[in-house]
Structure formats: C-alpha cells, structure tokens
Amino acid sequence: MPDFSLPALGWSDHFSEQLTDEDAALVPARLSSLHRDRVLALTATGAVELLCPPTLSVAAMAVGDWVLADGPRVGRVLDRISLLQRRAAGTGTVAQLIAANVDTMFVVTSCNADFNEARLERYLVLAHSAGITPVLVLTKADMAEAAPYIARAEGLSAGMAVVALNAKSGDLGVLDPWCRAGQTVVLLGSSGVGKSTLANSLTGGALETGAVREDDAKGRHTTTSRYLLALPTGGWLIDTPGVRELQLTDVADGIDVLFSDLIDLAAGCRFRDCKHTVEPGCAVQAAIKAGVVDARRLESWRKLGAEERANSSAMQVSKVRAAGKYTKKSAAKRRPGG
Ligand SMILES: Nc1nc2c(ncn2[C@@H]2O[C@H](COP(=O)(O)OP(=O)(O)OP(=O)(O)O)[C@@H](O)[C@H]2O)c(=O)[nH]1
Ligand SMILES: [Zn+2]
C-alpha cells in the first residue's frame, strides 16, 4: 500500500476548516469500503480498519467519505463536498448513501443508438443534485462519426464538457483534467456503453488483471482498495455496486440547475403560475417559437419535475443528510482548473 499525502487522497480546505483544536489527536481517513460494523479507510500512512461506535451507523457513511479516526474507531464524519444517494431497495422511503466527495461524474454514452437525451438529462440532474460536476463522455467514437453526437450532447447543458473517445484505445489523456491528484470521479451510464472498458483503461488495467484487492489491514500489501480505485494520474475512481443502480431521488436542486435557462425565461411570463402551455404572454413558448429553446427540453423539465415531486414526497433524506451534507459553494470551488 503506497503512502499518500492527504491532498493526494482528496483532502482540501473544505475538510481542514472543520477541524477544531480538540481534533488534534484524530487522524483523517478516507473511506474505501464499508462493512457491517467496520469500515476500511486510507490515511496518509496507509490503509486502516476502523470500528464504528454504537452511536454512528455504517449506513450514515459512504465510500469516499472523510472521517476522523479516534484510535481504532471512527470519531466523526466530516461535512461532504458532494453526496450521491438513492432509495434503498425494497423500502422506497429511506435514502441509501452511495458515494461521497465526488468531484466529477463521467456520464457515459456511445456514438450510436444508446444516445438518448431524456436519459442523459436524468444523469445530469442526478449529478447536479449531488453537487457533482457532470462531464459527458461519448464512447465508440472509433465506430461512427462523433460530431453529430457531440453537437447533441452540447445542446443538453450550456458549458458542460463533452468528450468523445475510444474507450478501448488505452489512451484516455483527454480525461486527465478530471483525474489529477486528489480528484475523485464516478462513471455512470446505461449497460453496454463502455463503463467497464473505461474503468479498466483509467485504472491501467488493474480491474481486468485482478490486481485490485482490498487491504484487510492485517498486514497484507495490496495495490489499492476495491471501491476507491487509485488512478495512475493521481485521481480516484469510486466504483461501487450502488453507483450502477442510481435513480432520481430528491433532485429538485439538480433540475433547477440543468434547466436554469428555462427558469430564467419563465420569470418573464405574464402570469406567475404560468404552465408554459397555452397561456398568453408565455416567455417560454415564445422562445420555443423563436427557435431559441428546444420544445423537447420543456417537456423534459416538466416530466422530471413531476417525477421528482412524486419521489420526494415519499422520501426522507433530511435525516441521513444531517450526518454530513454537502454545500454547493464548496462544490463550485473544486471544479477542474478552479
Ligand atoms: N470499438 C469500441 N468498443 C467499445 C468502446 N467502449 C466499449 N466498447 C465495447 O462495448 C462493449 C461493452 O462495453 P462495457 O465496458 O462492457 O460496457 P459497460 O458500460 O461496462 O456495460 P455494463 O457492464 O453492462 O454496464 C464491449 O464489447 C467493449 O469492448 C469504444 O469506445 N469503442
Ligand atoms: Zn410561461
């Protein structure tokens, strides 16, 4: 297990600012996997196994979380930069924490029939609501002309980075800006788009060769952990089973970010409760008629909003969030190059 500096593990001012004088004896540790009553974590001096005190449930933590180790135990969970969560299977009402302190979500789709605006929008909303910057990654650019797909992808969200590549090429330098030391990424996308291929290429083939094993903190030396994967560029990939099964939950903030242009337009509607359908003086419909706004996006905004309201009324995320919520301000600070 190589030693890492705290910044290389993803530590930043956001976390150090939470420390008080009383924390001097505690050790910052980043969670690499969770088990029934204990967690595995990486510290500046290597991997450790930590027990969870009775007052702190493992369910209140996620891979990627920063905790303060108090001897052999987790002392407390630090306030997060971002948090991915989903409904727990079978319950419908409890949020399950999936990954914490992720900087970038690679939303993966292919230059083929998998490309679907409505589905991609859901991932973008999920990223925004979690406080994570989305980057759209178009795979299979070696099998079709990428330009039309790039243009459609860029139409999804103004200013979003769009990258087209061959996930099998092994040269993914185009993704380096988001994979540098201390940066954390997740890969999301539907089946068959090339997530595993990308993960393998990004980690230098560690997944494929089986070189990735979990350190059990009993003296076994391992390359890296199972879910918090070290990238040769210095960054981290969080790849847990949970990341692959994410749904839209409590994403109102994310919807507002993705459709901020429509919200701005709606401020100019004659009626405050305008539904942007047939109302006179509707600024949104006017923009659609003028060709400034795609009618499809208005439809997506409506659908996602309705779905979100239905989901959120069944959800109680506030309790788990309290254990360590993220702040939009700190998420903005951590954009690449910023
Ligand atoms: N030519 C080409 N093939 C690719 C590319 N990316 C992925 N593939 C192939 O597409 C198939 C599916 O890729 P996977 O990496 O398994 O896709 P996935 O998203 O992990 O799929 P799930 O495991 O089902 O979620 C494999 O046969 C890959 O070799 C690419 O950029 N170019
Ligand atoms: Zn309107």
Image: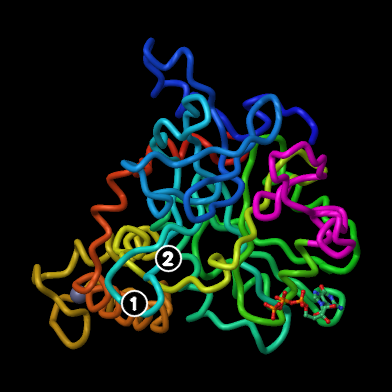
| Residue placed most toward the observer, 224 or 144 | 224
Count of marks overlaid on the render: 2
Q: How is the image coloured?
A: rainbow
Image quadrant where residue 94 sits: bottom left
Answer left or right for 12 relative to 94.
right
Q: Quadrant of the C terminus?
A: top right
Q: Quadrant of the N terminus?
A: top right
Horizontal and vertical percent position of residue 331: 45, 41
Residue at x 60% of width, y 44% of height: 40
Vertical comparison of 299 with 37: above or below: below
The disc at residue 125 is 2
Vertical comparison of 8 with 159: above or below: above
Q: What kind of element bears circle 2?
A: helix
Horizontal and vertical percent position of residue 124: 48, 65
Which residue is identified by label 1?
304
| Residue placed most toward the observer, 210 or 257 | 210
Q: Earlier in the sequence, mark 1 or mark 2?
A: 2
Answer left or right for 318 relative to 96.
left
Query: What type of secondary structure mainly makes up the magenta span?
Result: loop
Q: What kind of element bears circle 1?
A: helix
Identified by mark 1, the residue type is Leu
